[in-house]
Amino acid sequence: MSRRTALHLFEGYGIELEYMLVSSNSLDVLPVSDSILRSRAGRYVNEIENGAAGWSNEFVLHVMEIKNNRPSPSLSGLNRILQEQVVQINHLLEEREGRLMPSGMHPWMEPSREARIWNHRNRKIYETYDRIFGCKTHGWSNIQSIHLNLSFHGDEELGRLHAAVRLLLPLIPALAASSPIVEGKITGIIDNRLSFYRRNQLLVPSISGNIIPEAIFTRSEYEERILQKMYDDIAGYDTDGILRHEWLNSRGAIPRFERSAVEVRLADSQECPLADIAVASAVASVLKSLVNGCWASWQEQAAWPVEPLVSVLEKTIRFGEAAVIRDSEYLKAFGYVEKQARASDVWRYLIEESIVQGDFSDDDLMKPLQLILEEGTLSRRILKYAGQRPSAARLHEVYGKLCDCLAAGKMFAG
């Protein structure tokens, strides 16, 4: 999401959606994103503009990102704009016997064998990451997510937004997990993407921290305590300073000071833009209620340390919507009166409360959210359809149907 002037809280929204490129027949990864971008630009480029939307490369050649080019005053309607991009990319992929696949991870990809890292413009960035961390792994080469960008203007708004985001992050996998299968096996973890993501940069721990950001609420303190420490810690591995940029930060939400937005990045990619935007809208609406002090003051939100938030996040990564949250103080921060609750019940309550507060009003987006609340996260629906010990043929059938959902802009019912 680019901008020339900073917008105030909730005046601008940006969405980035990552989808996989796969073979039409085998559904194996298809590393042709460079070819797709070149077909539109006439040369190898990292991104193109396509009307109100844009397409861009990602770390590996079998993933592409679509996004709105400029901040939108609302998330409503963005799914239609982004769905049109899916249609156009699928059309180009047909010529290469390929199609787009949704979800947070490819279900049988073996990155060590199949990953091909972007090797065109800015390739030194990708080569440097690969040299330091060894990126032909799931935590690097097999992760697809939704990035939600929320505008802020100045330290006061940054502080209010960052406090709210920190508080909500642990609940996001319980709404948005879509990666239950790794290399053809059910792992028992609902959000494998985040499980791998948490460990992918342990060589330099300050880059991702504990995923839940530290309680820091001004730009100067953030630059001093987070960004500068990252730069210092990686300097021994990156002597040319190639990675010395704020995007090196890999926490679950990161302030992007260059565009005055906080980027929330814990949601797995869903089955289609309608579902992606519905999830993003639910997250944004609850954050707006938090920022408005509906359940707790800014001081109460800001006082939360990292550790108890990480504890909740670990449960939702493993169990998704079935996670039982027993931290009554955490529930109280959202105005939830019970001493413990399933994460799915907390989300149902939060969405209903956001409607009452007037922070969520799009009926079209409520329908996919109702399906998620009633039938479970996409991970849960995939598991219901696949069965306990799915064969390769069964997984091919499930993920073929997911590709169909993405192509048509339809929800997946397990």
Image (spheres, rainbow, N blue to C red):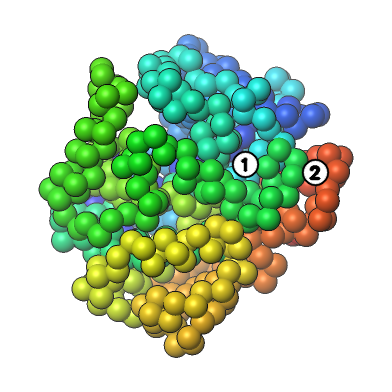
Q: Which residue is mark 2?
A: 395
| Kind of residue indicated by mark 2 | Leu
What residue occupies the far left of the structure in this picture? 220
Q: Which disc number belongs to residue 254?
A: none
For the point 44% across and 77% down, which residue is it?
327
Relative to 268, residue 308 above or below: below
Q: Mark 1 or mark 2, which has the lower sequence index?
A: 1
CA neighbours of label 1 inside 10 A, class few (<14), some (14 to 19), many (20+): many
Give the quarter of the figure containing the N terminus: top left
Give the quarter of the figure containing the C terminus: bottom right
For the point 27% across and 24% down, which residue is it?
236
Q: Is residue 275 visible to the viewer in this orientation of the structure?
A: no
Q: Which disc number belongs to residue 105?
A: 1
On the rendered structure, is 255 left or right of 268?
left
Whether residues under marks 1 and 2 lie with C-beta atoms below 8 angstroms apart, the answer is: no
Q: Secondary structure at mark 1?
A: loop
In which quarter of the view is residue 329 placed? bottom left
Relative to 69, residue 119 above or below: above
